[in-house]
Every structure is written in C-alpha cells, then in structure tokens.
Image: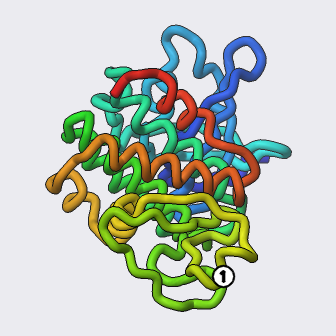
Amino acid sequence: MAQPTYTERALVLRRTKLGESDLILTMLADDGSLAKAVAKGARKPKSSFAARTEPLCVADLLCARGRSLDIVKEARLVAAHDPLRRGIEASAAAMPVLELLGRVAQPSLANPRLFQASTRALDVMDGADDAHRLAAAAACLLKVLAFSGLRPSLEVCVACGAPVALEEGARLPFSAIEGGVACAACRPSLETEPVDAATLCWAQWFIASTFDAVTEGPADLSATFAVLHLVQSLVRAHVGSPLKSLEFLFTSGLF
C-alpha cells in the first residue's frame, strides 16, 4: 500500500545523524509548527539531499507519512543562504535564530509569523555586513519571542502598567522573570537587574522596525550585544536554559 504524501515548505533548523547514512531533519514548517522527518541516504556522497537540507536552507519537500517519523522523498531548494553558511561571523550571527526557533516552535501548533519573520530576517542578512547581520539577528530573536507570547514590556511597568520613562543615561530595573521593566514603586517586590535605558530603546526599535530598516539603519555593535544579553536573560527565564549559540557569540571574540 502506497504511503500518503504531502508537500511542505520548511526552514531546516538542525540535522541529526541516524544510522549509517540517514539524517533526521528538524524544521520549521511554513505554518510555523515544528516538524521532523528522515532524509534517507542524505549522508551518502552522491545524495542530492545533502546540499538541499543543510541548516539555514529553505526547501520545498515532498514527504511520505511514516510510523514514527515522516520520510523526505524529494527536496527542492528555495533559498540556500550561502552567505550565512560560508563565513564564521555570518554563521555565528544566524545560528541563534535557528536555535530559538527550535526551542519555541511546537509540533502541530501553527504560528505562521515565526516562519515569515525568520525567513525574511535570513533573506536580508544574506546581503548585510557583519554588524547589520548581528542587528537583524537581535531583531529577529526579539520578534520570535514576541510572536511566541513572550514580548518584553519595555516602556510600561510589567507589574502595574505605569509608564516608565526611558531617559538618556538612566539605568532602569528590568525583571527577566516577569518579562519587562519595573517602575520605582514596584521594584522592591520584583527580582530585577539594572539595564541601560539605551538598551531598552534599541530593543524597542528592533521589535517595531522592519528587517530592511534594521539593516539600512545604524549598526552599533555594543548596543546590539547589550540587546542580545537582554534576550539571553529572557530566554533563560522563560524558555528554560540559555541559547548555546548566543553564549558562543558572547565569548568567541568574532565581533
């Protein structure tokens, strides 16, 4: 009896070895759900799957239903994102996006904005310089958190909703556990750490701006890294553990 098949466009997040020649692909489907499938023979030297199913690739797949994991029958490359895979700086900027998607996306739970935002971010990162790539990655990470229900409160107190002025030079209490900035009245009752108002302004701009605007606007590496540390705090508090790819970015000295 023939196995039922279906087509799906997906962003490859990671690959895991299976047996002597197969790969398990972990992917973000175009509806924003997490998907897994086996690419049989993908590790063989002459396999057509190898180059079409690398992490960062977007591909149109023909899959067959399997008992435990579906089987990839055909793969047509849509976007290879070669510039992000060829250089270590570019790859280091892009990997946190894939890692976070793999942590927040869920099987059979549609969230199309995850796919739309991440693939658009990778598209603009292809043609950006290193500093703007990192800024686009920070923007994408914040948007992914926001689309997953974890949008940080950056301008109003996370506890009482009172406006918080982001005055230049100020250091404001930020609670990663509660998910946002705190006012002076609520600060004693929350677990907070001081964050520069400028970092919160940059984070707000990243969330509100298009990826084209981010890659065409100013690129301040120090400010971007400050936002990435903020993202790591939110991920640690709400996703369960920090992103390993971000830790590498912080310690590698690449930028």
Is residue 89 positioned above or below 218 on the image? above
Task: Give the camera-side residue of 217 and 144.
Answer: 217
Task: Give the camera-side residue of 13 and 230.
Answer: 230
Task: Give the camera-side residue of 31 and 156.
Answer: 156
Q: In the figure, residue 241 lies in which quadrant?
A: top right
Q: Position of residue 202 (x, y in %)?
A: 34, 61
Left/right placement of residue 243 relative to residue 66 reads: left
Q: Position of residue 102 (x, y in %)?
A: 63, 47
Residue at 68% x, 32% y is 24
Q: In the figure, residue 78 lies in which quadrant?
A: top left
Q: Position of residue 4 (x, y in %)?
A: 70, 54
Amino acid residing under circle 1: Cys
Residue at 66% x, 82% y is 186
Residue at 33% x, 21% y is 86
Q: Which residue is mark 1?
A: 186
Q: Position of residue 203 (x, y in %)?
A: 40, 62
Q: Which quarter shows the C terminus?
A: top left
Q: Secondary structure at mark 1?
A: loop
Farthest left residue? Answer: 216
- Residue 199 visible in this rendered orientation of the protein: yes
Figure label count: 1
Farthest top residue? Answer: 45
Farthest right residue? Answer: 67
Left/right placement of residue 10 relative to residue 88 reads: right
Q: Residues within 10 Å of mark 1 (few under 14, many from 20)?
A: some
Task: Give the camera-side residue of 53 and 3.
Answer: 53
